[in-house]
Image: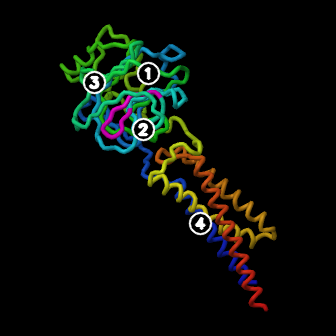
Amino acid sequence: MHKSINKLVMLSISALIILLVTLYFGVRLKGYTLINNVSLIEEGNGLRFDKYGVAYIGVNNLTIGGGAGIYSFTVEAAFKPSSLNKQIFSILFSIHNGVDEEQLIIGQWKSNIIVMNGNDYAHKRGVKRLSVNLASRPNEKIFFKITSGKNGAFLFLDGELVREDPELFLKIPKEPNLLLTLGNSVYGNQSWAGELYGLALLKESSENDSIFEVWQDKGVFQLPEGRDSFLFIDVTDAGKNKKGDSLNGLSGLVIPEYFPVLKKKILSPPLAGVSFEKNSIIDILINLFGFIPLGFILVSVIKEYCTMSLKQVVLISVLFCFFTSLFIEVTQAWIPSRSSQSLDLILNTVGGFLGALAAVKARGQRSETRDQCKT
């Protein structure tokens, strides 16, 4: 009797430990910190972004007009990337309306600055884009301009035309619910690192270099009189505001003290982001084998507590693994360093099932051994 109780206690403790370990590795922050890593440059002429940093203009403060989307516009920005070797696609600027395929972004991959609509970050779908390589200009301030209109899209660097595509027609996403971000995506998982000195979203496609001329002459990002803009963000006045306040009241730019996830992506489609690269394969194997111990121990504990058939015990164990994984994946949507994936949910559940089958087989072998000993 005492032996049976001790066994039950040991199994229960083991199950609790395995569950806690599974939850820990499922929801740990993996380098993410709650602090929003956006700071004022010492000279007061811009903002410095680091990993897990973002500034944004919310849906209540961003009204551009043209509900069906705008194809004629100009974006000008002055910035300096902190690195030209980042292996992830990071986002310096985005306008998002809730549909990833429609977002307008200026992003960085390694030493390339890329402008496009959509989320074809790896360029696997061949979505049209304009890009320029900054490898020859490390640690330099960049004045960047992209114009889009009926004649196509044109990219300027320090006042010079460097790329053009007469068949590329970029678009500001259709309203409502527009959300503008600086230094990150709306999901908080594509941090851009560097310094931003100013950004302007101007009406109509324009090759007018008046903003660049002021930048070149005075080293400040200013909108000259007469230029009509959808939005102008002059970060030279950032020092007048504290984190959590609006930056230049008219723009409504907010720099939160704590890092926010502006949009949650819960349970991405099973094949989203899957590749045959080493890291992706390792992640798949971890998700599959990580739940085998939990499935195994659950069968052992439930069978000791209850007089059920093995099929019922396996079903309960697998359901427990499923809901444990579901809790982890939903929680990960609030953690920028993690990714909420339906593929992970499937792999975790399959792993739990394999563990449960292994436990059933182990119990069967023990029963056969006992029967042989009795004979």
Q: CA distance from mark 2 to mark 3?
A: 38 Å
The kind of residue tagged 2 is Glu
Element at badge 3?
strand
Label 4 crowd bin: few (<14), some (14–19), many (20+), radius 10 Å: some
Element at badge 4?
helix
Which label lies toward us, 4 or 2? 4
Q: Is residue 264 above or below residue 239?
A: below
Specify the quadrant of the image occupied by residue 211: top left
Q: Which mark is residue 90?
A: none
Q: Is 115 included in the stretch rendered in magenta? A: yes
Q: CA distance from mark 4 to mark 2?
A: 36 Å
Residue stretch in magenta? 107-117
The kind of residue tagged 4 is Ile
Q: Is residue 148 above or below residue 117?
A: above
Q: Are marks 4 and 3 in contact (CB under 8 Å)?
A: no
Residue at numbered disc 2: 257
